[in-house]
Amino acid sequence: MKIHWEIAKKRGNHRPVLNYTLELEPFERELAVPRVVLDSAISKPPSAWRSYCYPGEDERAGAELDWYRLMTPSHKDGKVEAKLTLAWREPGNRFADVTAAFELLRQSFEAALKSAHDSAPLDLVESLDLSEVTRDYIVSSVARAKILAAVGF
C-alpha cells in the first residue's frame, strides 16, 4: 500500500489541513485484504468544519479534541483520498502524531496482508465411483440379463 500525505497551513490563525491518499498495489487488491480501521487515529478539533481557530477558542482554549478515523481502501476500490482539518498548533510542530498514525495503519494493514497471503490457493477436484462391493453385487444380475437377452429370453 502506498501512503502519501501533505500538510498545509496558511499564515495566521488558520488550522493545518491534511490531504492524504492511500492506494493498494494490484497484488494487494487480488488478495481481497479486508479494510483496516483505526478509530482514534488523528486528533480532530472542535468545530472542525471551520478552517481557523482564534486564540482562546476551541483547542486553543484547552477544549477536548475528538478523533478522526483512518481506514485502508476496500480491495474493490483500491484507493482512498481524504482531506482533514487538523487542530491548530504552535509554529514549528512536525506533526509526529500524524506520522505515527499512518505508520500504525501501515503496520496493521501489513499484518492483515500477511494473513491473507497465508491463505494458500486451492484447486481441489475429486470424484467417487461405485464401490467394488456394490459393483460385485450388481454385476452378476446385469451379466445374467445380457446373456439371457442375447439368446432370446
Image (tube, rainbow, N blue to C red):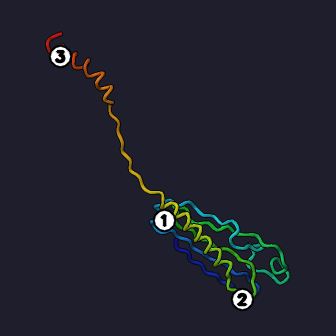
| Residue tagged 3 | 147
Question: Is 41 left or right of 112, judged from the image as shown?
Answer: right
**Which residue lies under the disc numbered 1?**
28
- Residue at the farthest left position: 151
User: Is residue 40 visible to the viewer in this orientation of the structure?
Assistant: yes
Say what amino acid the circle numbered 2 marks.
Arg
Q: Say if mark 1 contacts mark 2, CB within 8 Å.
A: no
Q: If you read the primary sequence from the N terminus, does the residue marked by circle 1 or circle 2 appear first?
A: 2
Q: Nearer the viewer, mark 1 or mark 3?
A: 3
Residue name at image x 76 percent, y 70 percent: 66
Q: Amino acid at mark 1?
A: Glu
Measured Cα–Cα span from mark 1 to mark 3: 65 Å
Q: SS class of the residue under badge 3? A: helix
Q: Nearer the viewer, mark 1 or mark 2?
A: 1
Lower position in the chain sequence, tag 2 or tag 3? 2
- The location of residue 142, given as percent across then percent down, is 25, 19
In the image, taking residue 50 as reference, residue 113 lies left or right, namely: left
Which amino acid, mark 3? Ile
**Residue pictured at 71% horizontal, 86% vertical:** 93
Location of mark 2 (residue)? 11
Q: CA distance from mark 1 to mark 2?
A: 40 Å
Q: Where, by quadrant of the figure, is residue 42 drawn? A: bottom right
Mark 2 vs mark 3, CA separation in Å? 103 Å
Residue 92, quarter of picture: bottom right
Helix, strand or loop at label 2? It is: loop
Instruction: Give the number of the mark in front: 2 or 3.
Output: 3
Quick check: marks 1 and 3 in contact, CB under 8 Å? Answer: no
Q: Secondary structure beneath disc 1? A: helix
Near-viewer residue (22 or 130) = 130
Image quadrant holding the C terminus, namely top left
